[in-house]
């Protein structure tokens, strides 16, 4: 009987201590990261900022949260030349799942490539002439028609964007009938803004 009494007292004391400290399970706000190739990413949750280094494939905030506490994970600062987003598990309530497992996905910023053309006039009989430009071997192509020109001049933009830091090289793939076209400013490296200074000039053959 004495043993049972002491055991009951110990159990009550343990319960009281647990209640005193909240008695709630603790959860780590964490997850995985895909595609982070540059420095500068900062995640935020519950007033805590978490810098994440280039190449990281996971993250975990230092401050744990109690069972039942709501959480929200956001991107406080984007990494250099990239855009990241919390694509899964950005918010919820701790304890709804066995653990918190958000997903952050990152991708290199991409920009358009284009410029202006001159001299691309229709044939003498009014037939439209077309010119095809190629960006490298895998950067896509664009077809320019004299039908879209005003006095043989106009603007063009490639349909395929170019990732920040990637080199581009634009050449004439198909010359228009009866004309010879050249490209100026056709090579470079994409860096933080769209390129719009390519110049294509066509002259009669």
Image (cartoon, grey):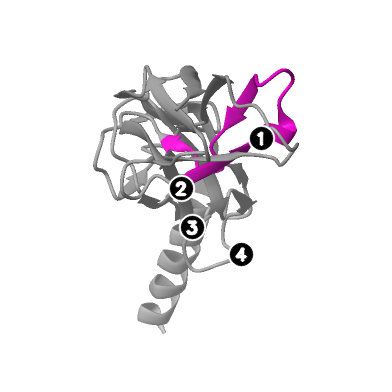
Q: Which residue is mark 2?
A: 104
Residue drawn at (53%, 55%), measured in percent from left and top?
24
Q: Are marks 3 and 2 in contact (CB under 8 Å)?
A: no
What is the x, y in percent for residue 91? 62, 49
Residue drawn at (35%, 45%), measured in percent from left and top?
59
What is the x, y in percent for residue 50? 39, 30
Residue drawn at (60%, 29%), measured in percent from left and top?
156
Q: Which residue is mark 1?
A: 123
> Which quarter of the figure has residue 149?
top right
Q: Nearer the viewer, mark 3 or mark 2?
A: 2
Tell me, for residue 1, which label it has, or none. none
* Magenta stretch in the rendered image: 141-162
Q: Which residue is mark 4?
A: 96
Alpha carbon of mark 3 to alpha carbon of mark 1: how far?
66 Å
Q: Nearer the viewer, residue 148 or 129?
A: 129
Q: Is residue 131 magenta?
A: no
Q: Nearer the viewer, mark 2 or mark 4?
A: 2
Location of the N terminus (image quadrant):
bottom left
What is the x, y in percent for residue 154? 66, 21
Mark positioned earlier in the residue sequence (2 or 1): 2
Q: Secondary structure at mark 2?
A: strand
Q: Residues within 10 Å of mark 1 (few under 14, many from 20)?
A: some
């Amino acid at each position: 009987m004495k043993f049972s009494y002491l055991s009951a007292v110990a159990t009550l004391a343990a319960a009281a201590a647990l209640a005193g400290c909240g008695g709630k399970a603790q959860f780590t706000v964490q997850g995985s990261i895909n595609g982070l190739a540059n420095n500068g990413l900062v995640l935020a949750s519950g007033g805590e900022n978490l810098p994440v280094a280039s190449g990281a494939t996971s993250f975990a905030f230092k401050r744990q949260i109690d069972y039942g506490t709501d959480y929200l994970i956001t991107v406080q600062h984007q990494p250099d030349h990239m855009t990241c987003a919390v694509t899964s598990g950005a918010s919820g309530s701790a304890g709804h799942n066995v653990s918190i497992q958000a997903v952050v996905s990152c991708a290199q910023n991409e920009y358009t490539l284009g410029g202006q053309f001159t001299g691309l006039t229709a044939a003498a009989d009014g037939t439209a002439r077309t010119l095809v430009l190629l960006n490298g071997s895998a950067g896509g192509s664009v077809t320019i028609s004299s039908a879209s020109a005003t006095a043989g001049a106009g603007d063009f933009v490639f349909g395929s964007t170019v990732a920040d830091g990637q080199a581009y090289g634009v050449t004439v793939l198909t010359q228009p009938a009866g004309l010879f076209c050249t490209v100026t400013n056709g090579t470079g490296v994409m860096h933080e803004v769209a390129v719009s200074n390519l110049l294509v000039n066509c002259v009669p053959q």
